[in-house]
Image: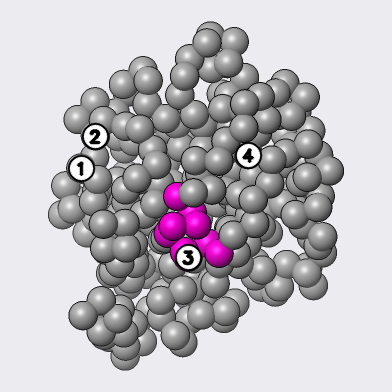
Amino acid sequence: MTKALAHNIRRHAIDMTNSGGSSHIGSILSIADILAVLYGTVLNYKADNPKWQDRDRFILSKGHAGAGVYAALAESGFMPIEKLKTHYQNGSNLSGHVSHKGIAGVEFSTGSLGHGLPVATGMALAAKINQNKHTIYVLMSDGECDEGSNWEAALFAPHHRLGNLVVIIDRNKLQSIHSTEDTLALEPFVDKWRAFGWNVIDIDGHDHEQLINACYSKVENKPLCIVANTIKGKGVSFMENQVLWHYRSPQGEEYEAAVNELENDNA
């Protein structure tokens, strides 16, 4: 079921970025499998009651990939599929960067990087103090780890023994105009999170079984960091590992080629 959902997220994202002329398709395709596993299996939610008190909270910190979340929400019953056609259009509330305003299922608007994890950490502490049982999940990019606010949160969460916090890092090794290692080196990335006191799991971010098992590997009183190794542009061969597709949208023959490739892979 989650693989079909991942395919649908990718197909919607290609259509949405094509019709809206919006960017970041590479970043969206990178996390389609992660979103599919979260919304298809892991997250506790009620699409017909999006403010249900016991729901898990999900924050997309790499807000520029918001079209992927909108697609996942539509496929999960939070909004009509038809609404996706308004993405990035004048007057629509489906903005390019993910927004919670008027969008059921979105907990927090993000755009400027480095905000999602600090907010999620505060939500996790509040839930722990109030003895609530839900979990806070945050999906962030590896390039986003250039932001110092993330490392403050990385210190804070283990100190407060936040076992109800799960961060998934989209480790595609590319950011806006270059590789992460040439921009501001992150390696040894896994060791750094472990040194901060997190329970760290290093996996293939496109393997659904590994993703599901990792999400269910929480340890009491210790935050969980899942380093999901992914491919930017995953699913469309000419976009894969190409930093060019951070800021482009597929148009004309490129759009047709992307659609055909995704449909052939799903046949």
Q: Quadrant of residue 129?
A: top right
Direction from residue 184 to residue 225 in the image, left or right:
left
Separation of residues labelled 4 and 1 (CA atoms): 28 Å
Q: Is residue 185 magenta?
A: no
Of label 4 and label 1, which has the lower sequence position? 1
Point out the frontmost of discs 1 and 3. Answer: 3
Specify start and end residues of the magenta stretch as a single range: 204-212
Labels 1 and 2: the sequence-earlier one: 2
Q: Is residue 208 magenta?
A: yes
Q: Residues within 10 Å of mark 3 (few under 14, many from 20)?
A: many
78, 227: nearer the viewer: 227
Q: Of marks 3 and 2, which one's residue comes earlier in the chain?
A: 2
Is residue 65 shown to the viewer in this render? no
Q: Are marks 4 and 1 in contact (CB under 8 Å)?
A: no
Nearer-the-camera pick, 228 or 60:
228
Marker disc for residue 77: 1
Residue at the image position 68 percent from the left and 46 percent from the top: 200
Q: What amino acid does circle 3 point to?
A: His
Viewer-proximal residue among 99 and 153:
153
Label 4, label 2: how far apart the Cα atoms are: 26 Å
Q: Which residue is mark 2?
A: 47
Q: Secondary structure at mark 2?
A: loop
* Left or right, residue 80 beside residue 137: left
Q: Give the labeled residue for mark 4.
A: 224
For badge 1, the amino acid type reads Gly
Q: Which mark is residue 206?
A: 3
Which amino acid, mark 4? Leu
